[in-house]
Amino acid sequence: MTTTAPRLGTALARLLILAAALLGTLLAGAAPASAHAALTGSDPKDGAVVATAPKEVNLTFSEQVAMSPDSIRVLDPAGRRADTGEIRDLCSGSIVRYGVGLRAGLPDGTYTVAWQTVSADSHPISGAFTFSIGAPSTTSVALPDRTAGGGLVGALYGIARYVSYAGFAVLVGGGAFVLACWPRGASVRPVQQTVVRGWLALTGATLAMLLLRSPYTGSGELSDAFDLAGLKAVLETKTGAALTSRLLLLGAAALFVAVLFGAYARRTDPKEKKDLSFGLGLGGTVVAAGIAGTWALAEHASTGLQPGIAMPVDILHLLAVAAWLGGLTVLLVSLYKAPSVERSAVERFSKVAFGAVAVLAATGIYQSWRQVGSWSALTGTRYGQLLLVKIGLMCVLIGIAWISRRWTQRLADTKPTGETGEGEEVGEAGEGGEAEEREEAEEREETEQNGAEAADPERAAQLARQRAAVATARRKRERDADPERAGLRRSVLTEAAVAVVLLAVTTVLTSTEPGRTEEEAARGTAASGPAAVPDRPVDIRLPFDTGGVDGKGVVRLSLDPGRTGANALHLFVERPNGKPLDVPEIKVALTLEAKNVGPLPVAPDRIQTGHWSASGVQIPMPGEWRIQVTVRTSDIDQTTIEKNVKIG
């Protein structure tokens, strides 16, 4: 039974629709703040109530970040700047901490801290929290609803990242496919167009990322993409240097492509062609590794655990991806647009793809360990879940590649008995001669038709339609003439479709906070957060003896709800027999020695005999607090009693 391959136009349309739909789904589901650094602590903490205004606000991050004068802003309840604008570097060893000074004489109320910076692996991060001085109050400041790297600019930047990865794969993998698998493909027009389009896509995406970088990490306004001052600032960053270096290397890649499809394609002497192939292979590998290095030096691998090992591993990973997926793209185009692609070329690519998969497996295991770090992070973080999706897609892709390999073996099995490599080359040469004769005949026919077309425009249109129909029929005959080749085309097309999905997942994965970082940030936040003390009233009994008449008794103290923030204080003074005792004065002081806070004085009001009360008693932070109660029973008799209690 004859097997017919799907038509190229319909297949490519479906492939593009699938890619667009999946990419849109992934980008829509991704968290806008695609950060790899994380805020692990702050002083004051989020929601804290402090008795007096602090001198500065400090932020602690999980990894190094790039700070600018406006990276930390503190706003008072009216929305005015309460900070001095001077960022202080408080980093020490592995601790990444920055602070901003506060102005003197700040009034009581709720203050908003808004921060925005760029992590060491080039991703913007931002956030906001509040703290209060004296007591919470209403504030006119609205917390930002858009995080850094989000909005239209973030979406465009993400698309540019995807296109740059795809362009790199097609450029590098396509060139490698021609040199290593199908040298004759250097003179095939569709192959040339595919590789050149890969170069154009990578170059255009890099320029777009360079222009969008400033609004992507800053204002988020698309109009700022053409701000020269912002572009100048970007060029001074590590990411700007990486993008600029990529553009320079793409200039060298353009020369490589020109030689590959020019001088190399025209060479007929085997020795000259072999020498030129060696030079192109060596130079192309260096340029490709350099372009891959612009990602490794500025993103994931450049920070965190073992960067000295991670960067070369990342370069190998990108080159292996390009050799497999880029070569697969050019093979797909060749199978449809150049049906005469040799069986030996497909067999050689099958071996190259197998080697690329082996490299991907080795480097991928290391990268997964480095970025995830634990089994809990693999299943409990967004990065780990995306990684599982990527691994699943890789398994599907390898399965389809195995099917393609089976079709390749069937192609080899259909060679006529006694056919050798030389015979194949002779056959191909004969096919080439026949093709040349057909082309000459078509040129003569076209010359005759052009004369007729000049005289009769209607006849010209009719002839054009006829020529298009004949060309379509000829391509269909070529496709349907070899059932094994048609089966190979279908399996390679399916493989390419899954590869498009895999590349989309990888793009989102590179802009998602690694599982290791997310878990470390969660542990740091938990460690610096409130003590795990249940919310319950603090009730204590404090016996006292002032030494005078009616100098003995007990103070029952109740602090409700017994946690940070506002509390209601009640004091009951009783005689030893339990009856109320009226005393001239009673005072309370609270001290948190571990943080050098206090003593915070509290002056309760007399409610009735033996009952004193104070409302709105502020506990600024959790910890082991010392409660001191001073009881005066006469003009000269008084005593101070104390007890430590844990307040959450």
Image (cartoon, grey):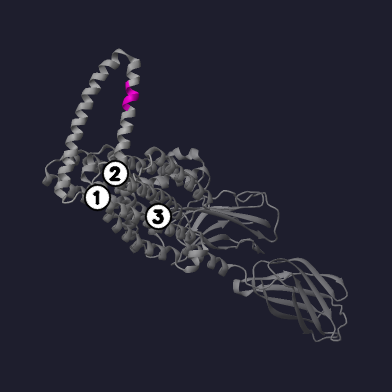
Badge 1 crowding class, 10 Å Cα cut-off, few under 14, some 14 to 19, many 20 or more, is few
Q: Is residue 165 left or right of residue 39?
A: left
Q: Residue at x 26, y 56 (%)?
A: 351
Q: Is residue 422 visible?
A: yes
Distance from Cα at disc 3 to Cα at disc 2: 46 Å
Marks 3 and 2 in Cβ contact (< 8 Å): no
- Which residue corresponds to mark 2? 482
- Which residue corresponds to mark 1? 414
Marks 1 and 2 in Cβ contact (< 8 Å): yes
Residue 464: say if magenta. yes
Residue 627 position by quadrant: bottom right
**Amino acid bearing label 2:** Asp
Q: Nearer the viewer, mark 1 or mark 3?
A: 1
Mark 3 or mark 1, which is nearer the start of the sequence?
A: 3
Marks 1 and 3 in Cβ contact (< 8 Å): no
The magenta region covers: 463-467
Image location (x, y in percent) of residue 374: 46, 68
Q: Is residue 283 visible?
A: no
- Which residue corresponds to mark 3? 299
Task: Check the image and name the residue furthest to the top.
Answer: 455
Task: Check the image and name the residue furthest to the front.
Answer: 1
Distance from Cα at disc 1 to Cα at disc 2: 10 Å
Badge 2 crowding class, 10 Å Cα cut-off, few under 14, some 14 to 19, many 20 or more, is some
Q: Secondary structure at mark 1?
A: loop
Residue 25: say if magenta. no
Image location (x, y in percent) of residue 287: 27, 49
Q: Is residue 50 left or right of residue 215?
A: right
Q: Secondary structure at mark 3?
A: loop
